[in-house]
Image (cartoon, rainbow, N blue to C red):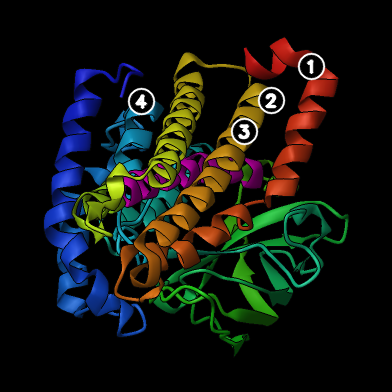
Amino acid sequence: MSFGLPPEALGLRGKVRDFVEAELRPLELEAEMNEGRIDPAQRKKHEAWAIANGITLMDVPEEFGGKSLPVLTQAAIVEQFGRVTNALGWCYGEAQAWMFEACTRDQIERYIMPLTRGRRHFCYAITEEHAGSDPSAIETTARNEGNRYLINGEKWHVTSYNLASTVIVQAKLESGAHCLFFCPANAPGLSVVRSPAYAHTYDHHHPILRFDGVAVSETDRIGAEGDGMGFTHSWFRRERLMIAARCCGAMERLIEDVTDFARSRVVSGEVIANYQLIQAMLADSVTDLHAARLVTYEAAAAHDRGDDVKSLHAKCSIAKLFASEAAGRVADRTVQIFGGRGYMRENVAERFYRELRVDRIWEGTSEIQRLIIARSLLKRGLEGTLK
């Protein structure tokens, strides 16, 4: 691609791609036919590779032994993990830079650094039945009782809870201020209401959790009282950018596979790659990928330049909006080109067709991204939004 990635980014991107192709991609069908599960030994092997190659440290500050890689390099790495289905690319814990600003030294030692070593696994309990894309509307409460908080409420779509040791939960104080807390996944009073089935086939489940007087120590509050929404916004920016990156990886994989198929599939004595309507779908898909990648990489590079945080917020929304919707279009065209084969679960197009749909929903729907972008335009103008 023509964005001009630095040599380090190109090298790391290539290393991750080789790992994805050699170790993860061959397990896609096994995972698909086993509700997303693979041999636990294989999963541990994948996590060990990510730890050994510094993937878990890529956003960790150097003072804590991290790589502190440019965000552009990180996006190029995460893009490659997007090339596989069944959440096989979710094979490592991600310690994010904002955590080192929000957490105390004690919390970093007890929670964040063990995450980078595979000794802890996180999940986020933010969304509720009536509070999705707008986390400010949450109703879960945290009552301060001196040296601890009692948390009560219900959380939906808690991704990866079944594999987590620690829950980061967002709750509202009596004052109305929001807080984030570290909470043990097996804490007394924390229970699974139910674990719904979803369109995708992941071993990372998304259950509904109930907090009934769950006691959390004051030492496990993240930041000061009232800082919760700010940290949630930092998390959203990161997640939205990396969703966009994974969507680019998925589009690249789909285009490669369907192009190979179109070159070999013969209909009426002619390979279908020679038919203009097939060529049009391929061309539109390449255009979608190229545009999405440029938008995503530019948003990542804006972080490295130190652009204003409000501008970064809008750019991450632009990247997620465009890349997630582009990926949906590419997946739809790919199914169409594969024809009946594209509707088979053993086909990458069918799996991505299901899996990519949620990228227009979680971490803020496409409609929410449009509101963020439009409000930035109205408040800061075009230059302030895109500079």
Task: Determine the secondary structure under disc 4.
Answer: loop
Q: Which mark is residue 310?
A: 2
Label whose residue precedes the other's in the sequence (2 or 1): 2
What percent of the width, then of the height, locates residue 193? 64, 89
Mark 4 residue type: Pro
Label whose residue precedes the other's in the sequence (1 or 4): 4
**Mark-to-mark CA distance, 4 and 2:** 19 Å
Mark 3 residue type: Ile
Q: Nearer the viewer, mark 1 or mark 4?
A: 1
Give the residues in magenta: 232-255
In the rendered view, would you say 11 is above or below 215? Answer: above
- Please tell me which residue is depicted at 19% across the width and 80% down the height of the picture: 39
Question: Which image quarter: residue 187?
Answer: bottom right
Question: Which image quarter: residue 33?
Answer: bottom left
Q: Which mark is residue 380?
A: 1
Task: Determine the secondary structure under disc 1.
Answer: helix
Query: Where is the C terminus found, in terms of image quarters?
Result: top right
**Mark-to-mark CA distance, 1 and 4:** 26 Å
Magenta stretch contains residue 242 = yes
Q: Which mark is residue 370?
A: none
Label whose residue precedes the other's in the sequence (1 or 3): 3
**Mark-to-mark CA distance, 1 and 3:** 15 Å
Question: Which of 29/260 is in front?
Answer: 260
- Please tell me which residue is depicted at 52% across the width and 75% down the height of the picture: 199
What percent of the width, then of the height, locates residue 61? 36, 32
**Mark-to-mark CA distance, 2 and 3:** 13 Å
